[in-house]
Amino acid sequence: MSDGPHRSLPMPPCWRRVAERCANVAFSTEEITNALIPALHQDCQSELSAEFIDGIRAVLDDQGSSLFKDDPRPRLEALREVAGCGIGVTLLDNVMELSPGGAAQLDDFAGAMAAALEDRAARRARQIEEHFYRKTTAPRALNTRTRLDQSIAASPLAALARQILKLDDKAPARQTVRMQGLDDGVRL
């Protein structure tokens, strides 16, 4: 007997929790979102260095305080070595697209981060869906993509982006609460 196809996913445990909630129709979109936000936050903590984020922020701050705006793309391109892979490269590309004229602000930086988070969530959703197609029956896999897309659309990615970039002084994303007993069942 199997615990489900999410057990064999080649992903970190936080993303397996997202897949588990997505595969089980007893979990609502809100509960999937509650697992999705900490998974994205953990990905950012493991892939983005403080040096990289501070470097982009310094370039944007210099552009904002400068009277004569120059092209920030060469200075941003120099940060590609520190960007790593994954979210860092996507973030850097998004910032470079948002600031072609050199007038990017910190809100643009947060928007670029939110777009990078949305891209990561969509990539993981496709990976979960593909894995479910290979490891389980087709009806379960068909519903998985819809539920993941709904939870991505409902998630507060802009707030998470501002929190990761330390633009807001909010507490870190809380861990998901695992239901333990009968009293913790389905919400009415």
Image (spheres, rainbow, N blue to C red):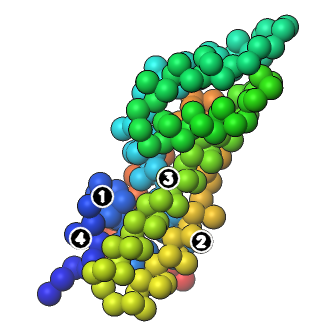
Disc with the residue nearer the chain's start (3 vs 1): 1
Q: Secondary structure at mark 1?
A: loop
Q: Return the residue at label 3.
A: 120
Say above or below: 94 vs 131.
Answer: above
Q: Is residue 12 left or right of residue 63?
A: left
Q: Secondary structure at mark 2?
A: helix
Q: Residues within 10 Å of mark 1 (few under 14, many from 20)?
A: some
Q: Return the residue at label 1.
A: 11
Q: Return the residue at label 4.
A: 7
The foreground one among 8 and 100 is: 100
Q: Return the residue at label 2.
A: 150
| Farthest top residue in view | 67
Cα–Cα gap, marks 1 and 2: 21 Å
Cα–Cα gap, marks 2 and 4: 23 Å
Q: Which amino acid is tagged 4?
A: Arg
Cα–Cα gap, marks 3 and 1: 13 Å
Q: Secondary structure at mark 3?
A: helix
Marks 1 and 4 in Cβ contact (< 8 Å): no
Cα–Cα gap, marks 1 and 4: 10 Å
The foreground one among 84 and 160 is: 84
The quadrant where residue 160 appears? top right
Q: Which amino acid is tagged 3?
A: Arg
Say above or below: 23 vs 152.
Answer: below
Marks 3 and 4 in Cβ contact (< 8 Å): no
Q: Is residue 2 left or right of residue 27?
A: left
